[in-house]
Image (cartoon, helix red, strand yellow):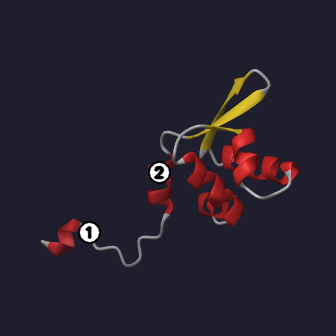
Amino acid sequence: MSLLSAVGDPVRWSVLERLADGPRCVCDLRAHVPVAPNLLSYHLKVLRDARLVTTSRRGRWVDYTLAEDAHERLVAALPTVGRVSLQEVS
């Protein structure tokens, strides 16, 4: 799955928006993303496989965090059609 396909789903985008505010435990994500737990697990796996989120275990809970390079990778994945380079402006 491509990076843009991974973020193109509204549920996964919701998760990324939530994680933009900082790390979240899966229990917090469940409370704010209105899907069944097994479906949320699937979407989190897609985001992990795309290396957009990282995980850490805290007891029986799993905390999710945006990957350090997630923003840069997403910007780089966007199409360049219509972008104006600084060289073209000067």
Name the residue carrying label 2. Answer: 71
Query: In which quadrant of the rendered view does residue 4 lie?
Result: bottom right
Local packing at callout 2 (Cα closer than 10 Å; few below 14, some 14-19, many 20+) is few
Local packing at callout 1 (Cα closer than 10 Å; few below 14, some 14-19, many 20+) is few
Could you tell me which quadrant the C terminus lies in? Answer: bottom left
Residue 6: x and y in percent read 66, 58
Residue 81: x and y in percent read 41, 77
Residue 75: x and y in percent read 45, 59
Location of residue 77 with respect to 65 vertically, above or below? below
Residue 87: x and y in percent read 19, 68
Name the residue carrying label 1. Answer: 85
Depth check: 18 or 44 in front? 18
Visible in this render: residue 51? Answer: yes
Query: In which quadrant of the rendered view does residue 14 lie?
Result: bottom right
- Mark in front: 1 vs 2: 2
Tell which residue pokes out farthest to the top in this image: 59
Point 84% across, 54% down: residue: 39
Location of residue 88 with respect to 12 vertically, above or below? below
